[in-house]
Image (tube, rainbow, N blue to C red):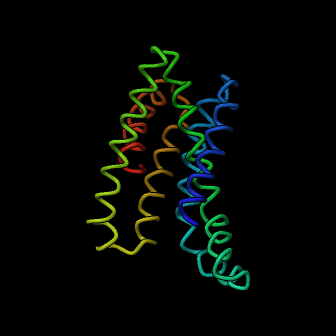
Amino acid sequence: SMITVTLGGLAAGYFAGGSLSKRERWNYPLFWGAITLGGTLLILIPFFVSPVVLATESIGLRFGPLVSAFVLFFPFFFLEGLLAPLALHIRARERHTGMTAGTLYGISTIGSLIGALTAGFFLIPVFALSSIFRAIGIILFIVGLVGLLPSKANRRLMSRWFIIFFFFVAG
């Protein structure tokens, strides 16, 4: 259920982000707003797990977890899926598109490896999942708010740091 919802949310976000990236003046606010809103959702997920699971319990063991995972995680993964096409569009204006895409996907894959090892061997055995969600949500929320600052220099600096953060930590 989680893999299905994760892949579905990201795919929907990629399509929507690609379509939305055509609107030049919306790219920065949408990028940083998606990060801020995604962080907010991640902070809130632990508070809604019990009510959502109880509400979907009657659906059964086959579809209940799928519906629960969809309700709890699809919006977050959709928002995070928006980021890759927007980041690519923002960065491609400064560089060759192929080089930008290769760099973003390379960092993303390395981030996934580090994230899987860190989560599996350190975070999950030591901390409650709700604490991990809140900590990462708070970081995303703060990074998103800073990125929404009006200064172009701030946005450019934060976009570089965020891309590194996102693909290493959130991956």
Image point 61% across, 47% down: which residue? 79
Please name the residue shown 50% across and 19% down the image. 92
Q: Residue at image x 56%, y 48%?
A: 36
* 88 sits to left or right of 125: right
- Please tell me which residue lies in front, 35 or 6: 6
* 111 shown above or below 90: below
Q: Furthest residue to the left?
A: 121
Against 10, residue 158 (above or below) is: above
What residue sits 62% from the left and 29% below the top?
Answer: 27
Q: Position of residue 13 (x, y in %)?
A: 63, 43
Q: Give the camera-side residue of 82 and 42.
A: 82
- Residue 99 x %, y %: 41, 19
| x and y percentages locating residue 146 in the rendered image | 48, 41
Check the image and name the residue furthest to the front: 62
* Number of marks in picture: 0
The relative height of residue 101 versus residue 70 in the rendered view (above or below) is above
Residue 49 horizontal side relative to residue 134, left or right: right
Q: Quadrant of the N terminus?
A: bottom right
- Residue 14 lies, with reference to residue 24, above or below; the image says below
- 112 relative position to 143: left or right: left
Q: Quadrant of residue 162?
A: top left
Which quadrant of the view contains residue 69? bottom right
Q: Position of residue 70 (x, y in %)?
A: 65, 64
